[in-house]
Image (tube, grey):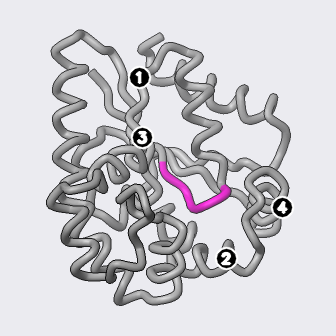
Amino acid sequence: MTVIGVTGNIGSGKSTVCRILAKLGVTIIDADELAHETYKPRSQTWQELINTFGKNIVKANEEIDRQKLGQIVFANPAALALLNQIVHPRAYRMAQEKIEDYHRQGAKAIVVEATLLIEAGWTDLVDKVWLVVTPEDVAIRRLTQHKGIAKAQILTRLKAQMPAEEKMKYADEVIYNAGSLGQLEAKVTELWHKLGLA
């Protein structure tokens, strides 16, 4: 079984790469979803987040307001480091368990989609690292048009992430995503066939 870590900074198109791989029959584990699962109301992580960042981050339905939490942590490297210390170890264990489950079920390939795959030290979970890279102006255009995120917010988040050039040192494959969806599909399909698992 091969485990591929797909990573890239905000707006790079890593989720699109994962959707293409899912169409090719690959099982996807989304690290963001796992992190959000750890936030469940009344869970240990939920309580730790409130103790650390205050009651203001809780919505009326007791769920963590991820937007409010994001505003706190992305503007403050120390707060972001605290959040990652609380959430990452638990999300890592969940990813590990999911990989083992899929392995038992006979999956030939699994993808772990994680923005912070390298920064969080998750590379030991995967056999290959695929890095998705896009120019900053393209990322900003995509996120403002498709996700409605304000430019200032995008720049703050990009600043909080490890530069793509630094991430390239850890990557087995670099996918440049500045062209059309068709070009991206062709590249991802080519890399997938190169693994010899299809």
Q: Residue at x 37, y 40 (%)?
A: 128
**Which of the two labelled residues, at mark 2 and mark 4, occupies the earlier sequence position?**
4
Q: Which residues are magenta?
A: 7-11
Distance from label 3 to label 2 (Cα)?
22 Å
Q: Does the image show residue 161?
A: no
Prevailing secondary structure of the magenta residues: loop
Mark 1 element type: strand
Distance from label 2 to label 1 (Cα)?
31 Å
Residue 18 vertical placement versus 43 (above, below): above
Q: Which residue is mark 2?
A: 153
Mark 4 element type: helix
Please tell me how crowded label 3 is: few (under 14), some (14-19), or many (20+) other residues with Cα within 10 Å: some
Which one is nearer the viewer's eye here, 198 or 20? Answer: 20
Circle 3/circle 2 CB separation < 8 Å: no
Q: Does the image show residue 196?
A: yes
**In the visual, does 11 lie left or right of 126?**
right
Mark 2 element type: helix
Q: Which residue is mark 4?
A: 141
Distance from label 1 to label 3 (Cα)?
10 Å
Q: Residue at x 47, y 44 (%)?
A: 6
Which of the 4 image quadrants contains residue 97?
top left
**Which of the two labelled residues, at mark 4 and mark 1, occupies the earlier sequence position?**
1
Q: Position of residue 181 (x, y in %)?
A: 79, 34
- Find residue 27 and name its label: 1
What kind of residue is marked 2? Gln
Q: Which residue is mark 3?
A: 30
Marks counted in the figure total: 4
